[in-house]
Amino acid sequence: MSSIAEAIKEAVSEVIATYTGQRPELLATEARKEDFAQAEISSIIGLTGEKLQGAFVVSMERDLLFSLMQVLLGDSPSELNQEALDMAGELANMICGAFRRRFENFGATLKASVPSMITGKDYKVHSLCKTPRVTFKFRVGDHPLFIEFCLDKLS
């Protein structure tokens, strides 16, 4: 594995393909400075290491979440409820965990916080790092999935 970007791509593919059989397609990667959220539902996971701290954010619209729930659970809610938020948090945990296992190949271990869930329209995810967040836009079926990642070295 050559890069952090590759580790994120592999982690998303591992989790989505394993649990749904769908292959996520990476559409774009960009550094972001603006704080507006990418999608209606965001799971924010804090990352800490011996000399590192950062964040891992998984964002999606309810359509994707509900379609994933349909595949995984055989049922999906008609509205955004606690079960749906729990599933979004668990998906974020699994993707972040798969990424963290790969990140160890770079010589550092990261610990993750419990996901904080944010939902709504036009909310902001304020800068979680001094460095710019890198956003990875995937397509799962007909739906976008966003992974945002940032990591700062502690002095």
Image (cartoon, helix red, strand yellow):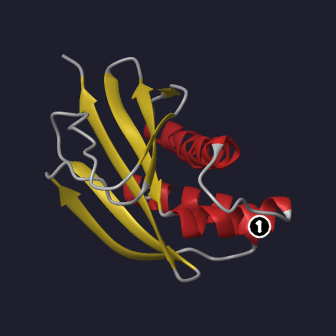
The location of residue 121, given as percent across then percent down, is: 34, 55
- Which residue, as the protein is rendered here, is positioned at the far front? 78
Residue 133, x across and y down, in percent:
24, 48
Q: Nearer the viewer, residue 52 or 32?
A: 32
Outermost residue toward the bottom in this view:
142
Residue located at (35% from left, 51% from top): 148
Residue identified by numbered label 1 = 70
Residue drawn 80% across the image and 61% down it: 72
Q: Position of residue 61 (x, y in %)?
A: 48, 64
Comparing 80 with 139, the one in front is 80
Viewed as shown, does residue 44 lie left or right of 122? right
Which residue is most to the right?
Answer: 74
The tally of labels here is 1
Q: Is residue 1 visible?
A: no
Q: Quadrant of the C terminus?
A: top left
Three-letter amino acid code at the position of disc 1: Gln
Q: Is residue 47 above or below residue 95?
A: above
Instruction: Locate residue 69 relative to residue 48 in the image: left or right.
Output: right
* The one of 85 and 16 positioned closer to us in this rendering: 85
Q: Residues within 10 Å of mark 1 (few under 14, many from 20)?
A: some
Q: Residue at x 69, y 65 (%)?
A: 68
Q: Judging from the image, what secondary structure is the residue with disc 1 in?
A: helix
Instruction: Name the residue nearer the viewer: 17 or 105.
Output: 17
Q: Residue at x 57, y 56 (%)?
A: 11
Q: Quadrant of residue 97?
A: top right
Q: Position of residue 27 (x, y in %)?
A: 38, 78
* Above or below, 109 relative to 120: above
- The answer to whether residue 71 of the structure is visible from this angle is yes
